[in-house]
Amino acid sequence: MKNILDEIMELKKERDAIILAHNYQIPEIQDIADVVGDSLKLSQVGKESEQRTIVLSGVRFMAESAKILSPEKTVLLPASDAGCPMADMIDIDKLRAFKAENPGVPVMCYVNSSADVKAESDICCTSANALKIARSLESDKILFVPDKCLGGYIAKMIPEKEFILYDGYCVTHNRIKREEVLKIRELYPESPILVHPECSSEIADMADFVGSTSQIISYAKNSDSREIIIGTEMGVMHKLQNDNPDKSFKLLSPSLICPNMKKTTLEDIRDALKYGREEIVLDEDIRVRAEKSLDDMLKLS
Ligand code: 13P
Ligand code: SF4
């Protein structure tokens, strides 16, 4: 009997597919993926890839972004119920109401959002390029959706502009408690604390570095510290440990697990390739308008 890894490799060839995995995916998937990265990297690589099929091992908005940018390719989301609770906190009606309360103000939308929310926004950003995108906008007043934590971080870093924030947040990153940071500081006073901007402002203010998952990974690689504290989803620990066998990494809180990022299994990847599921299909009018928001972001990245 063939083992599952051989099956995946064979099916990948048959379908002319590339496997893209987010930094939070389970280690077995990161190990077989062609590319592992943050949301920005996955959208860039998906668009540039030559394969006819993209298997996006992550959550729904990531697969939708790949489809928005590569309409001619087949994009597969192996675990069809892997969503992002933060992305689901806003929908088109809520966004329209938010815009109506603030007429004429441009909308900057975090990539953790549905295709129709992207279509109704002026430009997208990821956590890796949010500061650059916000600075590039001419307006000194910006509506930011849906993450109030990333939005609050941008607002703090760019005080010359006014940001009006929607009330969404990441349930996983918002589980970190102030007491956990204080305790780990006491235990490891010399160790830098690296966190994701989806953490609350209280936690981000206590950290030594704030960045996207890939920015955390590269900061850790370049750091002289031998012991580093990580304040983002535990999936990043796999790459951190592989890249830096001489360093030790501690998770800031044991609650840093995103259940949706843990839904995809190797069997799901195999079945996605075998049966072509779940294929992402988008309304063409929405796709075209969302493409503009994502393309404008990529041009500035
Ligand atoms: P990154 O773009 O930093 O990988 O973040 C995506 C995400 O969903 C974090 O929770
Ligand atoms: Fe969404 Fe948070 Fe999970 Fe990222 S970690 S996919 S923002 S719920």
Image (spheres, grey):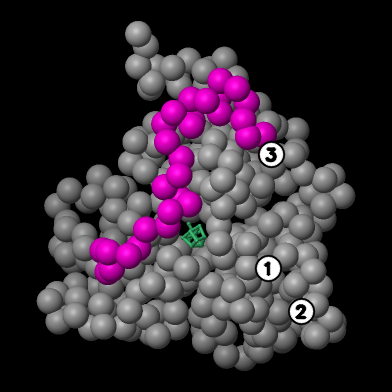
Identify the residue at horizontal 38%, vertical 39% (top origin).
30
Whether the residues at callouts 1 and 2 have beta carbons within 8 Å, the answer is: yes
- Real-space CA distance between mark 3 and mark 1, rounded to the nearest whole angstrom: 20 Å
Callout 2 amino acid: Phe
Residue assigned mark 2: 98
Question: Where, quadrant-wise, is the C terminus in this rendering?
Answer: bottom right
Q: Is residue 105 magenta?
A: no
Q: Which region of the structure is painted magenta?
A: 251-280
Numbered circle sitting on residue 280: 3
- Res 278 → quadrant: top right
Identify the residue at horizontal 19%, vertical 80% (top origin).
183
Is 61 in front, or is 255? 255
Please rate how many residues cluster around mark 2, counting C-alpha atoms within 10 Å: few if below 14, some from 14 to 19, many from 20.
some
Q: Say left or right for 222 vs 101.
A: left
Helix, strand or loop for disc 3: loop
Please rate how many residues cluster around mark 3, counting C-alpha atoms within 10 Å: few if below 14, some from 14 to 19, many from 20.
some
Helix, strand or loop for disc 2: helix
Callout 3 amino acid: Ile
How many discs mark residues in the rendered view? 3
Q: Is mark 1 within 8 Å of ligand 2?
A: no
Would you place residue 91 above or below residue 64 in this image?
Answer: below
- Res 71 → quadrant: top right
Numbered circle sitting on residue 90: 1
